[in-house]
Image (cartoon, helix red, strand yellow):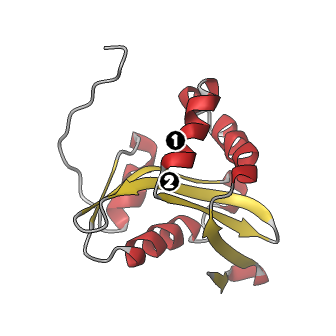
């Protein structure tokens, strides 16, 4: 999918390719998502096994991504959504969310978010929900 953004930038949303991972890892490092960076091989494996794996490019440069899982009918779970700091405010995050939701229109979107992004999601009509988490080390 291609679309025109402000400032005459052409945004392309496309499926993830293995060669994108180096750029995804860089974005994760810049965002200080250290768990993903420190566990690079596991993170790459997660990308290879996700049925929601899309990147956003402007002029051939990877500027954002969305990764998740879906059963295609009820739940669409967003694992990560990240936009390069230099490209925030252009609507790329919302475009990525809407793009994957249009692929599976009957699903509900669920995701975890940090406190910094809470306002963003609330402004987009998302509501908080209660859940639990346990890692393999616990």
- Residue at the spot of label 1: 46
**Label annotation for residue 86:** none
- Under circle 2, the secondary element is strand
Q: Nearer the viewer, residue 83 or 55?
A: 55
Asked if the residue at tag 2 contacts the one at tag 1, i.e. Cβ–Cβ closer than 8 Å, the answer is yes
- Under circle 1, the secondary element is helix
Q: Position of residue 50 (x, y in %)?
A: 48, 51
Q: Nearer the viewer, residue 127 or 112?
A: 112
Q: Position of residue 92 (x, y in %)?
A: 58, 68
Residue furthest out toward the front: 49
Q: Position of residue 102 (x, y in %)?
A: 40, 78
Indicate left or right for 46 with 87 as reference.
Answer: left
- Residue at the spot of label 2: 67
Residue beneath the point at 59% across and 26% down: 39
Which quadrant of the figure contains the N terminus?
Answer: bottom right
Residue furthest out toward the left: 130
Indicate left or right for 62 with 121 as reference.
Answer: right
Indicate left or right for 130 with 85 as reference.
Answer: left
């Amino acid at each position: 999918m291609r679309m025109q953004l402000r400032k005459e930038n052409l945004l392309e949303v496309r499926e993830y390719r293995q060669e994108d991972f180096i750029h995804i890892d860089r974005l994760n490092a810049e965002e200080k998502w250290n768990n993903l960076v420190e566990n690079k091989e596991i993170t790459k494996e997660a990308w290879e096994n996700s049925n929601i794996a899309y990147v956003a490019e402007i002029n051939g440069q990877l500027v954002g991504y969305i990764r998740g899982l879906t059963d295609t009918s009820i739940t669409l779970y967003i694992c990560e959504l990240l936009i390069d700091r230099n490209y925030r405010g252009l609507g790329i995050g919302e475009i990525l969310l809407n793009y994957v939701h249009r692929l599976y229109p009957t699903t509900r979107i669920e995701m975890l978010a940090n406190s910094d992004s809470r306002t963003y999601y609330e402004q987009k009509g998302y509501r908080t929900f209660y859940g639990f988490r346990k890692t393999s080390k616990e």
